[in-house]
Image (tube, grey):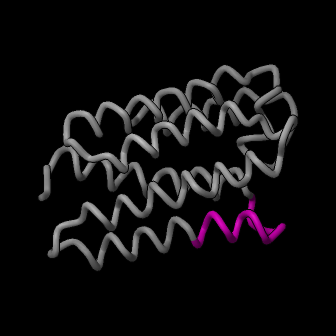
Amino acid sequence: MIGTLLMPLILWWTRDVDLKSMSAYANANNNFYYHAMHTLGSWFFILNGTAKRRNLYYWVGFGMGGILITNMYVVQTVHNVVTAITMGLAVASMIWYSSKKNMVSNIFMSALAVGVFVLGFLVDSVHLFFAEWFAMFIIAVHMVKKVHLDEE
């Protein structure tokens, strides 16, 4: 999970051009980090789905792979839809697999992740790249908490 969060930061630091979103780096010279981010995240969700027997995690992992397959420069609308569905599945899993004692905090974290992501997508003064990274960070914090605390 740490690698998934570090890859976009390395992508940003090694950029040779400023682009608005992470997906815009799909064809950039340093796109290795973009691909690594999605690959590591996909593996994390699929392996976690196998370990915890949680089918929704598989769909999030496959969705992250789908984001790579639907390059925004080829089919931008499909790419945006796959990204939205994957984000929706990730935050839905945060709520669906939540214990009763953590339900309120997980709903808040989910709403915050989606809110920041949508704000970055719709408002030009909010940098979409960092809004995407912040939403990923919130989901990663939740997933690390799930893995280490093993809340049921």
In the rendered image, the vertical position of residue 106 relative to residue 70, given as above or below: below
Q: Is 128 drawn above or below residue 7 in the view shown?
A: below
Q: Quadrant of residue 91?
A: bottom left
Q: Position of residue 130 (x, y in %)?
A: 65, 53
Residue 56 position within the rendered picture, expressed as x and y whole percent measured from the top left: 36, 50
Q: Looking at the rendering, in which quadrant would you find the C terminus?
A: bottom left
- Whole-percent x, y for residue 111 in the image: 48, 74
The answer to whether residue 47 is magenta is: no
- The answer to which of 34 and 126 lies nearer the viewer is 34
Q: Residue at x 65, y 49 (%)?
A: 82
Q: Residue at x 35, y 61 (%)?
A: 94
Give the side of residue 2 with respect to residue 152, left or right.
right
Q: Is residue 106 above or below residue 27?
A: below
Is 75 on the left or on the right of 116, as rendered? right
Q: How many marks?
A: 0
Image quadrant where residue 37 sits: top right
Residue under the point 39% across and 40% down: 58
**Quadrant location of residue 101?**
bottom left
Q: Is residue 34 above or below residue 52?
A: above
Range of the magenta residues? 115-127
